Image (spheres, rainbow, N blue to C red):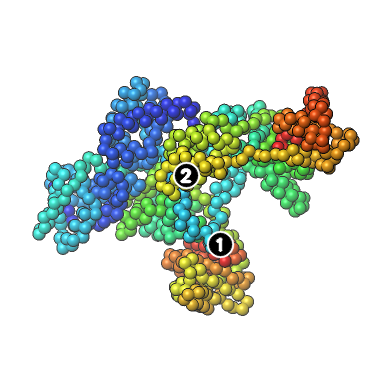
């Protein structure tokens, strides 16, 4: 094998591919990235058998062939030759040579025949979505997914179709985020549950591009097909909880605050909160009082009075400050609405006049 | 689901094939590609190999297909081809200790747990026939359920009445019927409820006036398949029973399928109207018994596999042979063992498991003579003390004799002891009483039913 390609282009792909390579797996070849030539393109593959990724970039090919080389090493090599515009790679008898104008590097590779294939799934069910919208949808809910492996259904992002929206949901059973991305005339598809770790890798691959993605779904697998990149991941074969049932339909108390005000107040308050990030809200619409306070026996205490428009019943409630903090960054409005019911019922947060994003967090019990 | 015989044949075949591959491949290769693979079924010479994900499917197909086919052919001549299908039982990892400490003390949880239940029809989608294990203990009930699926409503099994004690899979079975009907006939309206919910619904609509009542009546008359669980809780609720009776008639005459479950035979549900009893008996009454050894073995294996836990065969065997009784307890015990072995991060030995069973398994119910007398007296509504006194009033004599009879027949207590415990009577008196009840029971049907009802209470 012998080809020459743009250094920056290949580096971008290798950084993404390297992240996916398996690090603690028993099969050593999984820690490598696979390079193969095909006429005028270079194919780069990596997989950890959960997620698979494949890139195609243009290259000038002298002789066809393939090689598998350790991903981390390759990525580090590329990071340390930032001045080079083009690099030439040759492979012969399992030894891979990376040649630039001034450098000559040899890397021991693996037998490329042992590198797994990346499954290509049928498109019995599919839809297209712009990569920007897809990533926005996933990122809006990502922080709410459970990070533990105990319940695979909820350590995941759930994507389903509803009227003119594609809906992204994640919950760790203490809070829940739902993002509706408007997509008129899109095809209806069955809901899919994608493991959180896998979807993070998928969106990183498409993060810097703005293109139409073709999403293909089967019972076991999801694939995202872009112009130059292809990713695939297993999906969880379970039933996602019918979360819509727990979205409160009415509320007893409502406050509207400026996002920046709330953000500052929470940042300050969490300096004093305990390990559960407990912050105390005291709202009384009649007396025009909206206080956020925290107490810490060792450090001291804070109290912030927020300027807010309030309606409804007075309420005193303890919330997890981190949960509120997490959702503020994904709400792109200047004003926020917080809706309360009882002290032990979920609190709803959304942007003022924005129904596309809904965030639920459970109060802390005393 | 295939019969247990062919499953074990498939397992054997695959194990032999795997041992060949193990020799041919490097350890890393073998464990990466053949872990969690299995033969799902064989059909007309085609072997269906279940693999954990698409990556493995792709790789086996492209890389190892020839090798697998060759060795399977060597082992069994009539194999013509192999199909690979992704078959994954979702891994459920047990909660780690520190994690549960982090979350539980303060934080309220979103009520997600019961959201697996469909709002419209009350069915839990997790109950399907795919994860239902059939053994001789529930074969009859399963067959009846399958017959219903073929012809919903217009079969001889309408109504189907399934009874058996708690934790034997009744709810699983009847919900699975509901889910299956829903899948096969999306237009059919299926509804699952418990008798408790039904009566709450009824009471609510009564209290809300005639309009709500009409809504209630129409609601239940609209279903093509009505499933009512735990019907025994209807006892003593006369008006609810009457309402159910009318709904039943309406549905039955329109050839709508009805399924009931209960922990007792309809005849032994106390304070149940006889017209309901007779209607329950009009279709098919089947019981679900406690699983026998082989079924317990199969259940344990399946439950362990869904948790991705593969304990040594001797442990499964020991559990199945030493723990009798209901499936729920069996499951609880298995969960405990899985949890223990995850904490220790190794498989437990047989000796470590033995004390575990001693602690968890249900002790055999201990009943004293007094308890039995109390049940009998409660049944006949007389004061307990009369039984021990020397009175020959008719309303006391009969319960006393029945108590003696039950003590002798069911608990094998000697005649002299019975006499002594029941107010210091001679053993001949006891012998006479037992003899008398035995003979009377043959001639008097209502006496027989009474005795059966009392027995059902132990």
Q: CA distance from mark 1 to mark 2?
A: 34 Å
**x and y, in percent, of residue A96 in the image:** 15, 48
Q: Residue at x 59, y 37 (%)?
A: B326
Instruction: Classify the position of the C terminus of chain B by image quarter.
Output: top right
Q: Is residue A366 left or right of residue A40?
A: right
Task: Residue lying at the far top in this picture: please name it.
Answer: B77
Quarter residue B276 falls in = top right
- Which residue is tagged 1? A346
Identify the chain of the residue marked 1, using the numbered disc in the image.
A
* Marking on residue B338: 2
- Is residue B238 at least partly visible in the picture? yes
Q: Between residues A212 and B84, which one lies in front from this camera angle?
A: B84
Do the dots labelled 1 and 2 sit on one chain?
no
Q: Between residues A214 and B192, which one lies in front from this camera angle?
A: B192
- Tag 1 and tag 2, C-beta contact below 8 Å: no
Q: Residues within 10 Å of mark 2 (few under 14, many from 20)?
A: many
């Amino acid at each position: 094998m012998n080809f020459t390609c743009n250094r920056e282009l290949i580096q971008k792909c290798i950084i993404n591919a390297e992240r996916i390579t398996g690090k603690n797996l028993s099969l050593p070849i999984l820690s490598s990235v696979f390079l193969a030539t095909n006429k005028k393109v270079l194919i780069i593959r990596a997989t950890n058998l959960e997620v698979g990724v494949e890139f195609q970039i243009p290259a000038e090919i002298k002789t066809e062939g393939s090689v598998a080389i350790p991903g981390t090493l390759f990525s580090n090599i590329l990071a340390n030759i930032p001045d080079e515009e083009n690099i030439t790679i040759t492979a012969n008898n399992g030894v891979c040579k990376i040649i630039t104008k001034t450098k000559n590097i040899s890397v021991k590779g693996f037998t490329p025949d042992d590198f797994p294939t990346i499954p290509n799934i049928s498109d019995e069910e599919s839809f297209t979505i712009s990569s920007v919208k897809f990533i926005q949808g996933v990122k809006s809910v990502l922080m709410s997914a459970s990070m533990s492996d105990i319940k695979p259904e909820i350590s995941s992002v759930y994507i389903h179709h509803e009227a003119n929206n594609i809906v992204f949901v994640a919950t760790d059973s203490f809070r829940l985020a739902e993002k509706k991305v408007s997509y008129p005339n899109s095809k209806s598809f069955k809901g899919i549950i994608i493991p959180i770790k896998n979807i993070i890798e998928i969106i990183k691959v498409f993060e810097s591009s703005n293109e139409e993605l073709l999403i293909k779904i089967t019972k076991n697998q999801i694939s995202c097909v872009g112009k130059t990149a292809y990713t695939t991941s297993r999906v969880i074969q379970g039933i996602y909880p019918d979360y819509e049932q727990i979205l409160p339909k009415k509320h007893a108390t409502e406050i509207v605050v400026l996002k920046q005000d709330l953000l500052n107040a929470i940042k300050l308050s969490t300096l004093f909160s305990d390990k559960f990030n407990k912050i105390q809200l005291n709202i009384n619409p009649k007396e025009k009082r909206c206080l956020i306070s925290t107490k810490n026996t060792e450090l001291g205490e804070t109290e912030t009075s927020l300027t807010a428009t309030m309606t409804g019943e007075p309420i005193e409630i303890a919330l997890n400050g981190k949960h509120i903090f997490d959702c503020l960054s994904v709400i792109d409005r200047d004003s926020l609405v917080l809706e309360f019911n009882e002290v032990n019922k979920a609190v709803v947060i959304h942007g003022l006049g924005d129904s596309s994003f809904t965030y639920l967090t459970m109060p802390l019990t005393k | 689901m295939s019969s247990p015989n062919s499953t074990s044949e498939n397992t054997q075949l695959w194990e032999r094939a795997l041992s060949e591959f193990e020799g041919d491949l490097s350890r890393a290769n073998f464990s990466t590609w053949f872990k969690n693979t299995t033969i799902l079924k064989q059909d007309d010479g085609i072997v269906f190999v279940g693999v954990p994900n698409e990556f493995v499917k792709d790789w086996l197909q492209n890389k190892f297909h020839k090798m697998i086919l060759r060795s399977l052919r060597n082992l069994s001549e009539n194999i013509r081809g192999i199909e690979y299908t992704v078959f994954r039982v979702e891994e459920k990892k047990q909660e780690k200790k520190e994690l549960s400490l982090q979350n539980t003390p303060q934080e309220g949880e979103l009520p997600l747990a019961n959201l697996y239940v469909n709002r419209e029809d009350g069915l839990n989608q997790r109950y399907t026939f795919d994860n239902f294990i059939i053994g001789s203990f529930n074969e009859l009930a399963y067959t009846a359920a399958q017959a219903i699926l073929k012809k919903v409503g217009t079969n001889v099994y309408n109504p189907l009445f399934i009874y058996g004690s708690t934790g034997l899979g009744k709810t699983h079975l009847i919900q699975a019927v509901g889910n299956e009907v829903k899948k096969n006939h999306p237009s059919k309206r299926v509804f699952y409820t418990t008798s408790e919910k039904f009566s709450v619904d009824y009471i609510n609509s009564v209290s809300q006036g005639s309009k709500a009542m009409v809504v209630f009546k129409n609601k239940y008359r609209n279903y093509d398949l009505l499933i009512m669980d735990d019907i025994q809780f209807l006892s003593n609720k006369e008006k609810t029973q009457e309402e159910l009776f009318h709904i039943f008639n309406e549905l039955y005459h329109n050839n709508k399928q009805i399924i009931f479950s209960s922990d007792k035979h309809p005849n032994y549900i106390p304070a149940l109207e006889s017209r309901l009893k007779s209607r329950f008996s009009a279709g098919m009454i089947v019981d679900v018994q406690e699983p026998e050894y082989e079924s317990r073995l199969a259940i344990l294996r399946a439950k362990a596999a869904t948790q991705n836990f593969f304990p040594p065969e001797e442990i499964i065997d020991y559990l199945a042979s030493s723990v009798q009784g209901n499936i729920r307890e069996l499951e609880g015990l298995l969960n405990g063992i899985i949890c223990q072995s995850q904490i220790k991060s190794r498989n437990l030995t047989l000796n470590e498991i033995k004390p575990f069973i001693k602690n968890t398994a249900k002790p055999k119910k201990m009943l004293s003579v007094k308890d039995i007398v109390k049940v009998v007296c409660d049944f006949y509504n007389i004061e307990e003390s009369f039984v021990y006194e020397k009175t020959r009033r008719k309303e006391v004599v009969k319960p006393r004799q029945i108590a003696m009879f039950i003590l002798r027949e069911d608990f094998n207590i000697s005649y002299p002891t019975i006499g002594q415990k029941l107010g210091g009577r001679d053993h001949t008196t006891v012998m006479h009483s037992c003899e008398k009840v035995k003979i009377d029971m043959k001639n008097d049907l209502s006496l027989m039913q009474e005795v059966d009802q009392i027995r059902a209470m132990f």
